[in-house]
Image (cartoon, rainbow, N blue to C red):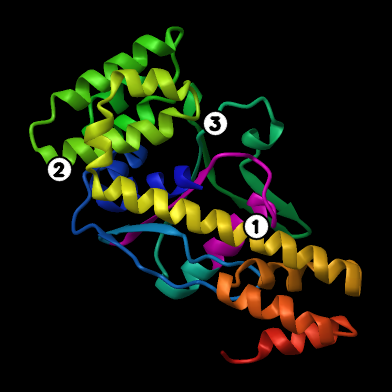
Amino acid sequence: MAYDNICKYLAEEYPSEFFHWLLGEEPRDIQVLKTELSSEPIQADALTVLQSTNQILHLEFQTLPPSEPPLPFRMLDYWVRLHRKYRCPIEQVVIFLKSTTSQMVFNNEFRDINTWHRYRIIRLWEQDPQPLLANRALLPLATLARSNRPNLLLEQVVAEVDRIEEQGQLRTLAACVDVLAGLRFEKDLVRRLLSEEIMEESVTYQDIIQKGRQRGKQEEAVLIVMRQLTLRLGLLDPVLQQRIEGLSITRLEELSEALLDFKTATDLAVWLDQEQ
């Protein structure tokens, strides 16, 4: 979704600001780690990982609580693989964007026999908006913060964006505000306050929207292929399902043709193991 892409962009474009907001520290030598943790059964190519000196901040942005695999298990899996690769302290923070009463947004741990892993949860709609309003990089998130008068909060955010003198940054942050505010406000209200012309000129905005469209097409292709496979082979093993969900649109199209020759789930597994 565009919401996830926006948050990922902000964290990677302004890593120091996120580090300071979430950990209360002024980071030194901070960098965005372009880490690859794509081993099965979890596709982790969208991880947002920031490193400062000898500490890692791993961020996960969630629009809706449900996920597959479940979020607690994913956070444990990510931590193990990050720790194996970097061997340094890791702070994990899950930021829920959209207000909900689901109990899932209050669960900050994974428990199983002899295993207990905890991480930090932030429900954005409970957060004080002032620290977010005071930092230009966090203005898009401020639209979703705690407020008894949300429309006034949105006006404050737009006012702060308008104060940005550098035009490139102004266009980019205005575009990010437009997308994230859509989780809480009617689009017409947001567009009345923001300049649509500014957003349309933002290269970042256009890139994020395009990625969102591509992801939407990929998800639709997954649904079609999964429906075909279920009809042909019955209920699939979760591991195989996860592998299918990680395929590109091109590979999904190839799979939709190849599955006509499948007789068992083993045929599917063999096909997925093929190098392309």
> Which residue is more in the foreground, 148 or 118?
148
Name the mark nearer the viewer: 3 or 1: 1
| Residue type marked 1 | Glu
**Image quarter for residue 237?**
bottom right
Q: Are marks 3 and 1 in contact (CB under 8 Å)?
A: no
Q: Position of residue 262 (x, y in %)?
A: 84, 85
Q: Nearer the viewer, mark 1 or mark 2?
A: 1
The residue segment tinted magenta is 54-80
**Residue 9, position in %: x, y?**
34, 50
State which quadrant residue 167 falls in. Answer: top left
Q: In which quadrant will I find the C terminus?
A: bottom right
In front: mark 3 or mark 2? 2
The residue located at (82%, 71%) in the rendering is 229
Q: Establish if 106 lies above or below 9.
A: above
Q: Secondary structure at mark 3?
A: loop
Q: Nearer the viewer, residue 179 or 21?
A: 179
| Crowding at mark 2 (Cα within 10 Å: few <14, some 14-19, many 20+) | some
Circle 2 residue: 168
Residue that carries the numbered disc 1 in the rendered image: 220
**Magenta stretch encompasses residue 13:** no
Residue 177 falls left or right of residue 5: left
Residue that appears at 23% across and 33% down: 197
Query: What numbered label is drawn on residue 98?
Result: 3
Q: Classify residue 43 as left or right of residue 212.
A: right
Query: Residue 68 in magenta?
Result: yes
Tell whether 66 sits left or right of 92.
Answer: right
